[in-house]
Image (cartoon, coloured by chain):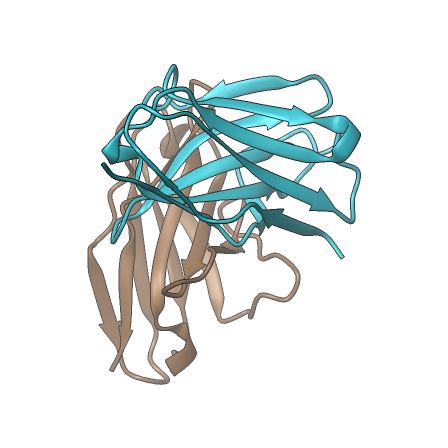
Amino acid sequence: EVQLVQSGAEVKKPGESLMISCETSGYSFTTYCIGWVRQMPGKGLEWMGIIYPGDSDTRYSPSFQGQVTISADKSISTAYVQWSSLRASDTAIYFCARAAAAGRHDAFDIWGQGTMVTVSS
Amino acid sequence: QSALTQPASVSGSPGQSITISCTGTSSDLGGYNYVSWYQQHPGKAPKLMIYDVSNRPSGVSNRFSGSKSGNTASLTISGLQAEDEAYYYCSSYTSTSTVVFGGGTRLTVL
């Protein structure tokens, strides 16, 4: 069974750094890209970016370029998104998701359970 | 890049059919047949319902169908059921090799 299991909820202060993870299992990690999606409280889905774990090729939405860093560790089949300096506006649920087809990143068929990140002073 | 445009809400009675529209531009939805639709129940992760404009993943009911004309895609749900009440989001591949979501549509089953 293909599974994406995300790290637990985080409560941070503005200016702090953070890395959340997405541990995958049940398929070849390097074959499919992993994406990250933000959902702010009461709002819709926002595509943040993706990584192809096989070669670490990344693509970012213009809204998130320079704001977050997406990475992956092939040795443990895990993807990450990190912030160097959090803002209150980063408060949201963050989902990781696996691409529905190898070599593509336009649709996600398997999703993690979401990680709630709260940034508050 | 701007979000795709969806109606904020639609509603229908059990057994009826409803259609949710999703409008983009020639740089995203109109330029590629890579349109997807997701269903999200409150507090849950999204679920892929349609990909490549009109294809259903295994396990998705054939009551869900998708289509596209020009810069507008549509999701149709026939034989509406109470369990279909949820938020629906469209998404499209873009000319910058990224993906953009729609703002989401709340479906109410009356």
In x, y percent, where is residue A98?
61, 42
Relative depth, front residue between B89 and A75: A75
Q: Colour of chain B?
A: brown
Residue at screen point 57% across, 46% down: A6
Relative depth, front residue between A75 and B82: A75
Q: Is residue B97 left or right of residue A111?
A: left
Residue at screen point 75% across, 30% down: A30
In x, y percent, where is residue B80?
38, 78
Residue at screen point 53% across, 54% down: A113
Identify the image quadrant of residue A10: top left
Q: Is A46 placed above or below B22 here?
A: above
Q: Is A3 placed above or below A67 here?
A: below
Q: Is residue B79 visible?
A: no
Residue at screen point 29% across, 51% down: B104
In x, y percent, where is residue A75?
79, 28
Figure disc tally = 0
Q: Is residue A6 left or right of residue A11?
A: right
Q: Quadrant of the N terminus of chain A?
A: bottom right
Q: Is residue B109 visible?
A: yes
Q: Is residue A24 left or right of residue B55?
A: right
- Which residue of the protein is positioned furthest toward the left in this rendering? B8
In x, y percent, where is residue B110?
24, 82
Q: Quadrant of the C terminus of chain A?
A: top left
Q: Is A22 placed above or below B59 here?
A: above
Identify the image quadrant of residue A102: top right
Relative depth, front residue between A35 and B76: A35
Chain shown in cyan: A
Q: Is B98 placed above or below B5 here?
A: above
